[in-house]
Amino acid sequence: MDLPEAQFNERMIAAVRSADVMSILFVRVGQSMIVDLRREGGSEPAVLLDDIVSTPQARLQSFRRLRPELPLPDRLTLAPWTNAVRDFGDAGILEALLERCRLEGGGELRDRADAAYRRLVALERRFLRELVRGEGMETIWQRSDR
C-alpha cells in the first residue's frame, strides 16, 4: 500500500533530521545524494553526488571509494525520490536537509548540500531538454501508414 504523499514527505523529513548516513536516490536523474555526517579520525561531514547503484549492498560498498578514510557505516538510510528534483525542495525536504547540514557542519556543509541540489536540478533540466528533442533516444516502434 502506497503512503499518501504528505505522509511520505514527513517520513523523508524525519529521516533527514535523524540519519547520520543517508543516500537519497534521485531516480529521474540517476544520481544519489549521499549525506555522511560522521566525524571520525579527523574526517569532516560530507555531501556527495554519485551514480545510483543497483543494490543497497553496492551503495554500502561504495563508501570504500567515496570515503576511504572512514570505516563502512554501521547504518545506512536509503530513501528513493521518484518525483521531480524540484519537488524535493517544494516538499520542504531540502530545507530540512540544509538545516541539518548547517547544524552538523556549519555554513560550508550547508552550501555544499545546496550546490549538490542545484546540480541535480541542472541535470534534470538537461535530461528533460534532451528528452523533448529526442537526443540520445532511439525509435523502437514507428506507426506505419497504410
Image (cartoon, rainbow, N blue to C red):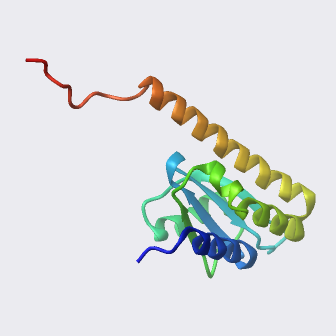
Furthest residue to the right?
107
From the top left corner, tell me how far across and down residue 73 is, in percent: 64, 76
Residue 132 appears left or right of 32 = left
What is the quadrant of residue 33 in the picture?
Answer: bottom right
Question: Which is nearer the eye, 5 or 127?
Answer: 5
Relative vertical location of residue 81 with respect to residue 75 in this rendering, above or below: above
Residue under the point 81% across and 61% down: 98
What is the quadrant of residue 121 in the picture?
Answer: top right
Relative vertical location of residue 77 with respect to residue 45 in this rendering, above or below: below
Residue 126 appears left or right of 90 = left
Residue under the point 53% across and 35% down: 127
Furthest residue to the left?
146
| One can see residue 43 in this view | no
Furthest residue to the top?
146
From the top left corner, tell me how far across and down residue 8 is, in percent: 58, 72
Residue under the point 44% across and 73% down: 2
Q: Quadrant of the C terminus?
A: top left
Relative vertical location of residue 130 with respect to residue 3 in this rendering, above or below: above
Residue 136 appears left or right of 123 = left
Residue under the point 73% across and 79% down: 18
Question: Which is nearer the eye, 61 or 86?
Answer: 86
From the top left corner, tell me how far across and down residue 105 is, in percent: 87, 65
Q: Quadrant of the N terminus?
A: bottom left
Question: Which is nearer the eye, 42 or 27?
Answer: 27
Q: What is the number of callouts on the image?
A: 0
| One can see residue 54 in this view | yes
What is the quadrant of residue 91 in the picture?
Answer: bottom right
